[in-house]
Amino acid sequence: MCPSESFIEKEAAQRRPWTHVAKVTVIGNAEVGKTSLTVRFVEGYYNPRYLMTIGTNFFVKDIEMGDRVLRLQIWDTAGQERFGPIRKLYYRGVKGTLLVYDQSNPLSFERLGSWVEEVKQACDNIPIVLVGNKADLPAKVAPEQGAQFAKEHRMTFIESSAKTGLNVGLAFERLAQLVLSHLGSDTPSSED
Ligand SMILES: Nc1nc2c(ncn2[C@@H]2O[C@H](COP(=O)(O)OP(=O)(O)OP(=O)(O)O)[C@@H](O)[C@H]2O)c(=O)[nH]1
Ligand SMILES: [Mg+2]
């Protein structure tokens, strides 16, 4: 059933206008769950089927933080190797990123170093939240290893499951907090 027009108008009126805007990306190896995490966060559902991202997907989500509302423009990038050159085009103006690996796939953890390098080369010291996804599956990479990598690279570490919803909101909210503190309280928007 479609919601009535008056319901939609009432919903829109209740939503607070955004005060800050920031572009963020979701990066990491193919199949680690970048799209699943983003769709879970923005649209609230989970799809067990793998649909490889081609190029990039774009989402928008407002996050209220005290008297401020941060509009996150989320670019969910493609992790397949062949999309590397395209992905690099999307780094311009990025204010923070979720770097995702799959706790049940050691290769995705081993590649984290090259992802950090890629971000460093493209962006000036942006906040990175390291996300160890698929926490609902038996871990082949211990959470302590994720936490250690994050510590060495001065990142926040969060274990998540797009399937169960564990810590998905927390990961994006933590990123939003870091981005907002980097933007500074006087900056109304940060689009480049
Ligand atoms: N068990 C489990 N499966 C997951 C989880 N997150 C994602 N998946 C599954 O893993 C597969 C890949 O998920 P995607 O979200 O498409 O992965 P991606 O990182 O966006 O992949 P690319 O777009 O190719 O870079 C899909 O079959 C998802 O349903 C999770 O938390 N737990
Ligand atoms: Mg994807």
Image (spheres, helix red, strand yellow):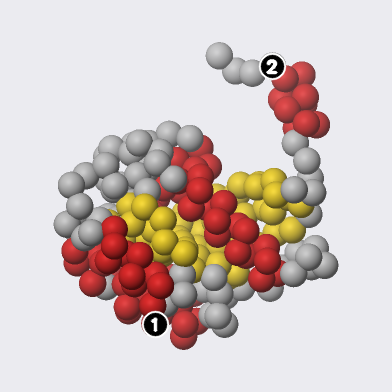
- Can residue 29 be seen here? no
Instruction: Give the SS element for disc 2.
Output: loop
Name the residue beneath numbered marker 1: 117
Tell me what residue is drawn at x 66 percent, y 47 percent.
Answer: 62
First-in-chain label (1 vs 2): 2
Specify the amino acid type for callout 2. Answer: Ser
Discs 1, 2 touching: Cβ within 8 Å: no
Check residue 53 in the rendering and tell me which mark sits there, or answer none: none
Give the label, 1 or 2, closer to the camera: 1
Asked if residue 98 is positioned above or below residue 66 in the image, the reply reads below
Check residue 4 in the rendering and tell me which mark sits there, or answer none: 2
Q: Quadrant of the N terminus?
A: top right
Instruction: Give the SS element for disc 1.
Output: helix
The reply, left or right, for residue 57 in relation to residue 5 is: left
Specify the amino acid type for callout 1. Answer: Glu
Q: Position of residue 111 (x, y in %)?
A: 27, 73
Q: Quadrant of residue 106?
A: bottom left
What crowding class fits label 1: few (fewer than 14 Cα within 10 Å), some (14-19), or many (20 or more)? few
- Looking at the image, which is closer to me, 88 or 95? 95
Q: Position of residue 189 (x, y in %)?
A: 76, 64
Q: Position of residue 113 (x, y in %)?
A: 32, 78
Outermost residue toward the bottom?
121
Tell me what residue is drawn at x 36 percent, y 75 percent.
Answer: 115
Q: Position of residue 120 (x, y in %)?
A: 47, 82
Q: Quadrant of the C terminus?
A: bottom right
Asked if residue 100 is positioned above or below residue 123 in the image, the reply reads above
Tell me what residue is drawn at x 77 percent, y 19 percent.
Answer: 6
Label 2 CB-ligand 1 distance < 8 A? no
Structural distance between the alpha carbons of marks 1 and 2: 49 Å
How many numbered markers are drawn?
2
Q: Quadrant of residue 3?
A: top right
